[in-house]
Image (cartoon, rainbow, N blue to C red):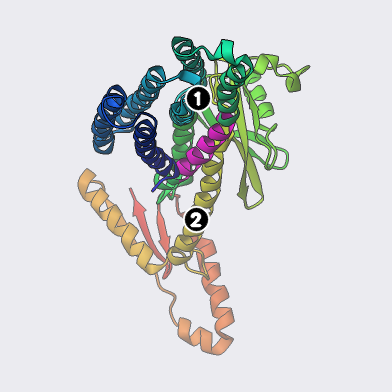
Amino acid sequence: MLVLSRIRRWLIGCRWVMLGLMMLLAFVEHGPWPGYGPLLAVLALGSLLQWGLHMGWERASTPLSQQRVLGAILTLDFLIVAAACWLERGLESPFFFFLFVPVVAAALEWPCRQVLLLVVLATALCAASTLRHENLFFTDPGNAVLRLAFFPALTLGLIPLVRRLRETAAVAEVQDKVWERLAGVEIEDRIFERASELAQRLTGGETVGFVLYRRLEISPLYVLGRKEWSKTHREAILHLAQKAKPGEPFFTGNLQRDRRLRGEEVPFGGSWVSLFVDLRDGKHGALFVHHSQPFSLPPWSPFLLEPVGRALTTQLQHARRLEAVRRAVEQDALTGLYAHEAFLRYFQQEINRSRRYGHPLTLVLMAIRHLDLYNRVHSYEEGDQLIKAVVKTLLPLTRETDLLADGAVIAWRW
């Protein structure tokens, strides 16, 4: 199970505990019916609605529908606690502290502006409910101000911790998605394409690509999105991609106003992130994402791209090893030509092609007479040199489309 799903389920469990504690506190404070009546009705109705929304969240089939149901659950949490505080004594009510549950849960799911708005509404509600009942501001103003400031201060202090938890959970989810998307991909171009598409979906960038570094050569390896870059744009992309160092991604929300880029000509604005990628085999490069609008890429984009970079390195190594094994199996170690089994497989493909298009196909069989006698007289090493000489003679006489295999078998395509 993914980390973020576990956190959401844990928070839903906390809501049921919160409702139970609120009912217990209300019973202890008011005793049995009728003093307990209005508050009991609010909590009972809230519990019933919570149960219905929880069942809807469990049965939601898509992440978007789950997010909508979760938003309804958070809103209902806030309304239940707000109604309890309004019926009670505001800041002096024990239900005041339960406001932290929906606000902290909202910080995990909602944008920062909506969370701050929720904090402001909760603080205003506490102040209004206090004025509605015994006026604590006049009887004990110091305690009232302290209680009123305690809620937003502690909540705003918890929001960065919750955001960090969300980033960690998002990275865990991205790791699973990366391996799912790149698993089984063997061709290098296809690996870069899949990784670029994934990076674009994760960050929402308009242009995504890879830049490959070599000793004296820097070239764009793969670019997804805008491809009509001018020479100046291309040089700027290569320059910005090199800003990423091992373990130090380069991120900026506004290219034109970033102080680290003063004196450097950047012909385009917007937001940018680049991540160093170690491709091994003496090669390394950078994965970059660009958006034309400033502050359009999330600040945790480098965290989201790290699993992509690690998976890219692993998959490229896997693809190269697989290609080396395939080459070793298909080629003869002595001559470097196709082995007999590989030739039969490719030759069958040529026969099918010839039948389909009606083109002629020629098979030429050649043999070196008395090769066994030559090996016994001159040694097997000399026999190997003779075979290499024959192959060296045949190679200039064949085309790239012809198949030359071990045993000196040639199939000419006409």
Region in magenta: 159-175
The residue at the point 38 percent across, 40 percent down is: 17
Figure check: 274 above or below 177: above
- Earlier residue among tags 1 and 2: 1
The residue beneath circle 1 is 205
- Tag 1–tag 2 contact (CB < 8 Å): no
Circle on res. 98: none
Q: Inspect the image, locate mark 1, and give the three-letter code of the amino acid beneath it.
A: Gly
Q: Secondary structure at mark 1?
A: loop
The residue wearing badge 2 is 318
The x, y position of residue 189, in whole percent, is 47, 41
Residue 253 horizontal side relative to residue 325, left or right:
right
Task: Tell which tag, 1 or 2, sits nearer the viewer.
Answer: 1
Mark 1 Cα-neighbour bin, 10 Å: few <14, some 14–19, many ≥20? many
Judge by depth and name the residue closer to the eye, 300 or 407.
300
Can residue 189 be seen from the camera position used here?
no
The residue most toward the bottom is: 376
Q: Is residue 125 above or below residue 63?
A: above
Judge by depth and name the residue closer to the eye, 9 or 111: 9
Could you tell me how far apart the alpha carbons at marks 1 and 2 are, in whole angstroms?
28 Å
Residue 319, percent across and down?
A: 48, 53
* Residue 128 lies within the magenta run: no
* Residue 252 appears in view: yes
Above or below, 156 against 178 in this view is above
Residue 296 x %, y %? 53, 19
